[in-house]
Image (cartoon, coloured by chain):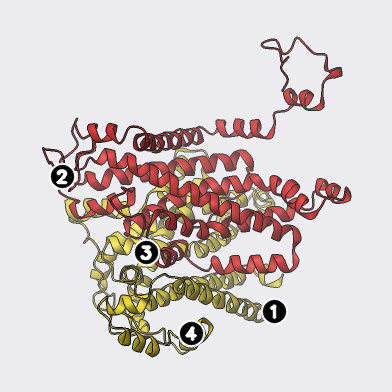
Amino acid sequence: MRYRYIAIRLLQTVPVLFGVSVVVFIIIHSAPGDPVVNMLGIEATDENVAQIRQAYGLNDPLYVQYANWLGGILQGDLGQSLTQNRSVTALIASRLPATLFLAVASMLIAVVIAIPAGIISAVRKGSASDYGVTLGALTGISIPNFWLGLILILLFARTYNVFPPGNYVPPSEDPVAAIRHVALPAITVGTAFAALLARQTRSSMLDNLNQEYVKMAKSKGLGSRKIFVRHALKQALLPVITVAGLQFGYLLSATVVVEQVFAWPGMGRLIWSAVQQQDYPTVQGTVLVVATLFVLINVIVDLTYSYLDPRVSAS
Amino acid sequence: MSGENPTGGSAGTDDSAGQTADESTKPESPTGFRRTWRGFRAHGLAVAGLVVVSVVTLVGIFSYVDDAFLGNSLITSVYYSPFAPEFMPLQGPSMAHPFGTDTLGRDVLARTIYGAKVSIQVALTAVLVAASLGSPLGVVAGYLGGTVETVVMRTVDVMLGFPALVLAIGLVAALGFNLTNVIIALGIVYVPQFARIARSTALSVSNEEYVDAAKALGYSTPHIVFREVLPNCISPLLVQASLLMAFAIIAEASLSFLGLGVQPPTPTWGQMVSDGSGYLTSAPWISLFPGAAIFVTVLGFNLIGDGLRDALDPRESAERRF
């Protein structure tokens, strides 16, 4: 049963990913202006332009271009960057680790802060700490991340020299330095994420604390700590996992902006510079990879959920 | 309508016999709007949010008025001094320049006021575009079901396959960086959010008795969809709209911050924060004030959204999507 669910869930992503690739292709190809002229500059002769158009297959009908592009993707070839003398795949491969490192670090920080905060807030509903968590979460959701990043740099890097203002160090080279350098960007990205998780933890904890089985456990005379850990917490964390997965898209969106603040050499900066330079193959490839990553993470979340709660895959 | 409505003593005239239906029901139980407003008002923070948003909107409108009727005179004469004889860049906050001046000697307060206009304009229009495209789509999908539902919801799934801001960046990259295109991009990005909620609400509304009654009376499908089902899906859509206003403001500011939004010389909050990022230690006010404006405005919309949600449907969970 479970394997069948996994197979079905994986198969379901195929049309979504196909749709995503079509959307990316259509968006980029609806861009006005001729990318070849942009690439060669205004001094390009007509022959030059024609040559390049031929070489890049830009004279083919759109569906042929799409089919070629898709064929390439399936073989791991996302095309050639127009501005840098490298393949888009190589560019992405060089940038992806920095983004993933930042995303994972942000997620860890968010989880470590949010889940205990959400639990305390729910268990002590109406208390000062509940009020504090609720208000803190609201602030976390409302604060623009790029501004928060600048404030953190101003406070912790410039005024008090606690953490360096970004600059990626690969964890494989120097783990300690890597953690120090990722601290500020990860706090920046993680804040809003933590706020969302804390809210979700609080509300699903409250739902569960009011459930029959918790009341039942209480009436059986079980200690409140036991009830809490064995019954309420386990159930309450299920929706939190879902939200964490769904919000991973937010995390990726946030890294695009925050990478700019901290000069973080990840996918976000790659998309940004490609957009600035009208390097359409790179924009196309990076957006596709980010979206694919997001879709796949949602699948993993769904599968984790079904593992933790077998009722899901049975239905 | 009812011109003979008593001015003060409503309790005195209690001859309900000859009254029309809508007059007799009004004083008894509060209407949906009144009940909502009562619930909303009980939420102290929500009212604070409404006040904040109103102030920011008025400030935005003020800059329109200044543009249209005062020829920028007010702002120019009091605050705006790009080519003033005493060119004073990077001045800290003072009486003359409460928020300080930027690298070109422009008044940060005046530019922050102008930024309110762009922010509110973009967010409001984008959310309206998204709501007016997404809600009917979702309602039609939910009510009709079948192939229509499959097509709409699979498209929604694909759109939700993109992180919102990444899709917005892709769209402005293709369309070009200006006000209209930022609105179009954010409008498109938020369509699925409305479609999803409209569909799930429409699914439950479709089973209500008044929809069956409308069917039995032989009303056409468009009539039922748009006159019966859609109006009854408004509450969750309204909550979604106010929360999306908050996201749209952050998204617009993020695009501007990245230089992919509304272009200079039109001042936007995101752009101003970015301008000041190179002068963090020497002139922090350039970034701090417009950033605080974004923060306060977004907070306001979030408070309104939370208040509306509690007032309209206390059961709905806090789950949201970026």
Q: Amino acid at mark 1?
A: Met
Q: Amino acid at mark 4?
A: Gln
- Chain letter for mark 1: A
Disc 4 to disc 1, C-alpha distance: 41 Å
Residue ID for mark 1? A1
User: In the image, residue A241 lies at what x, y percent?
Assistant: 53, 63
- Tell me, yes or no, if residue A193 can be seen here: no
Q: The N terminus of chain A is located in which quarter? A: bottom right
Q: The C terminus of chain A is located in which quarter? A: bottom right
User: In the image, residue B180 lies at what x, y percent?
Assistant: 43, 55
- The answer as to whether the residues below labels 4 and 2 share one chain is no
Residue ID for mark 4? A65
Disc 1 to disc 3, C-alpha distance: 38 Å
Disc 2 to disc 3, C-alpha distance: 30 Å
Residue ID for mark 3? A255
Disc 4 to disc 2, C-alpha distance: 52 Å
- Chain letter for mark 2: B
| Chain that is yellow in the image | A
Q: Amino acid at mark 2?
A: Leu
Residue contact between numbered discs 3 and 4, judged by CB atoms under 8 Å? no
* Mark toward the start of the polypeptide (4 vs 1): 1
* Mark toward the start of the polypeptide (1 vs 3): 1
- The answer as to whether the residues below labels 1 and 3 share one chain is yes
Residue contact between numbered discs 1 and 3, judged by CB atoms under 8 Å? no
